[in-house]
Image: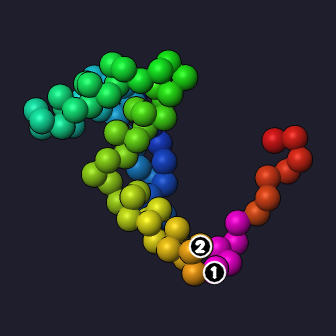
């Protein structure tokens, strides 16, 4: 079984590819070449975030984030809560 990443997009659980090879397999040749250039030069500490960003590309996650940031920019209360001390 292939490794997957799980997240919620639009209120639904979504499984994303969870390996470099699986993320690359979702792309056309041009995007895969761009992905290869970036992933091969990403610092080790940034590899997980880089992989997730590419895995999320093409999902509705960006639209959801954009809508949230627009609400924040308008000063709307989005129900965010401070993290507990020490977390």
Residue 33 sits inside the magenta stretch: no
Q: Is residue 85 visible?
A: yes
Q: What element carries label 1?
A: loop
The disc label shown at residue 76, or none: 1
Task: Left or right? Give the position of 59 relative to 34.
Answer: right
Give the residue drawn at x 34%, y 25%.
39
Figure quadrant of the N terminus: top left
Q: Determine whether label 1 and label 2 are within 8 Å by CB.
A: yes
Task: Left or right? Give the position of 17 relative to 77.
Answer: left
Q: Position of residue 11 (x, y in %)?
A: 48, 64
Give the residue drawn at x 70%, y 72%.
79
State whether residue 84 is above or below residue 52: below
- The local crowd at label 1, few if under 14, some if 14 to 19, many if 20 or more residues have their Cα within 10 Å, is few
The disc label shown at residue 18, or none: none
Give the image quarter of residue 42.
top left
Q: Where is residue 8 in the image (x, y as percent from the top left)?
A: 49, 54
Number of on-image labels: 2
Q: Residue furthest left?
A: 29
- Which stretch appears magenta? 75-80
Q: Position of residue 34 (x, y in %)?
A: 22, 32
Give the image quarter of residue 71.
bottom right
State whether residue 87 is above or below residue 78: above
Q: Which of 51 and 34 is in front in this view?
A: 34
Give the residue drawn at x 40%, y 41%.
53
Q: Is mark 2 on a helix, strand or loop?
A: helix
State whether residue 78 is above or below residue 22: below
Q: Mark 2 points at which residue?
A: 72
Q: Position of residue 17 (x, y in %)?
A: 34, 34
Figure quadrant of the C terminus: top right
Task: Left or right? Give the position of 86 relative to 49.
Answer: right
Give the image quarter of residue 54.
top left
Q: Which of 13 and 33 is in front in this view?
A: 33
């Amino acid at each position: 079984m292939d490794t997957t990443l799980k997240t919620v997009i639009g209120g639904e659980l979504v499984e994303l590819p969870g390996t470099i090879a699986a993320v690359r397999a979702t792309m056309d040749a041009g995007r895969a070449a761009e992905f290869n250039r970036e992933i091969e030069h990403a610092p080790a500490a940034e590899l997980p975030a880089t992989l997730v960003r590419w895995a999320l590309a093409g999902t509705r996650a960006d639209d959801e984030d954009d809508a949230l940031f627009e609400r924040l920019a308008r000063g709307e209360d989005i129900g965010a809560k401070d993290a507990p001390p020490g977390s």
